[in-house]
Image (cartoon, rainbow, N blue to C red):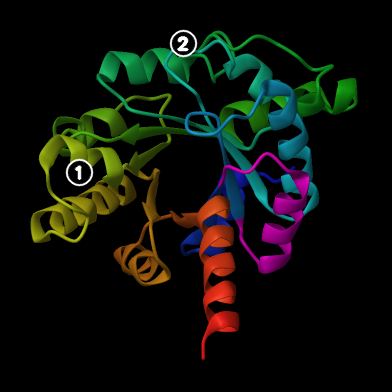
Amino acid sequence: MKQFLEFCAARGGSLLGTWLKLPTLATVEMLGRAGFDFLVIDMEHAPHSLDQVYQFIFATQASGMAALVRLPDHSGSDIQRLLDSGADGLLAPRMTSVETAERLTRQMVFSPKGERGLGTTSRAGSWGQTPMADYLKRGDEQCLRMVQLESWDTVTAVEDYLAIPTVNGVFVGHGDLYLSSGKPSSAPEVRELTQRVAAAARSAGKLSGAAAATPEEARIYTEMGYSLVMVSNDATIFAKAAAAAVAEARAK
């Protein structure tokens, strides 16, 4: 398991990742061999069970990547077990208020600053073999606690979310931003707002994240200075490669 925030700082630039949607360990290994820095295991838009996610976290880290998990909802019921599983961080989707962001991220920080319970006998504590101080330090100082801002109102209020002590990263969700505003990620006003988020996070000393549909779009976010840039997802990468192979083989 990496010291994730230290790893991000040491790189000094954008890390490249993708979403994990296919429920298979083979995908994880192939993405690691491809050279991705991290995966986000998607519990919001993919049929992953908690047992599967536990295995994905292990396989992702064993393949040389950081393992982040997107929560399925705002209930917070999976937070403790995902962190005990050794996840390098969590993404909380579809923030609706600063209060919701604070409530969820407080559950990711140990007491008394937060509400996370002690679980040193879990995988995160190497089943009781990690010294207590190291276990607590990794949980409080090295795990990502990133909130996804996905409506026009929440993205424009990015500074309010960055001001939450238990939040150490913000993520722009361009898909749902399009639903709420009718403006695609390529619209000038969205690009300007996206740049503002990266700058605000940098000023606050926190991480920023964005997802891109294509490598070309991913390079735009890298140039903006985003800490974590995601490109496509495993299912779409496979589907497009398969369709291209069939089209090429049948071409006359």
**From this viewpoint, is residue 38 visible?**
yes
Residue at disc 2, secondary structure: loop
> Which numbered disc flags the more N-terminal residue, 2 or 1?
2
- State which region is magenta: 20-37
Q: Residue sitting at 66 percent across and 24 percent down?
A: 49
Asked whether 130 or 177 is in front, the reply is 177
Asked whether 81 or 47 is in front, the reply is 47
Packing grade of label 1 (10 A; few <14, some 14-19, many >=20) is some
Asked whether 226 or 205 is in front, the reply is 226
Vertical order, 9 against 44 (above or below): below
Q: Quadrant of the N terminus?
A: top right
Packing grade of label 2 (10 A; few <14, some 14-19, many >=20) is few
Asked where in the image residue 250 lies, by quadrant, the reply is: bottom right
- Residue 89 is tagged as none
Marks 2 and 1, how far apart at CA: 25 Å
Q: Which residue is mark 1?
A: 178
**From this viewpoint, is residue 143 visible?**
no
Vertical order, 138 against 60 (above or below): above
Q: For residue 26: magenta?
A: yes
Residue type pointed to by label 1: Tyr
Q: Residue sitting at 48 percent across and 33 percent down?
A: 45
In the displayed orientation, state which residue is furthest to the left: 189
Vertical order, 60 against 154 (above or below): below
**Residue 182 % position (x, y):** 12, 44
**Residue 14 % position (x, y):** 46, 62
**Residue 77 % position (x, y):** 56, 10
Q: Which residue is mark 2?
A: 75
Residue at disc 1, secondary structure: helix
Q: Residue sitting at 37 percent across and 70 percent down?
A: 219
Asked whether 44 or 124 is in front, the reply is 44
Residue type pointed to by label 2: Ser
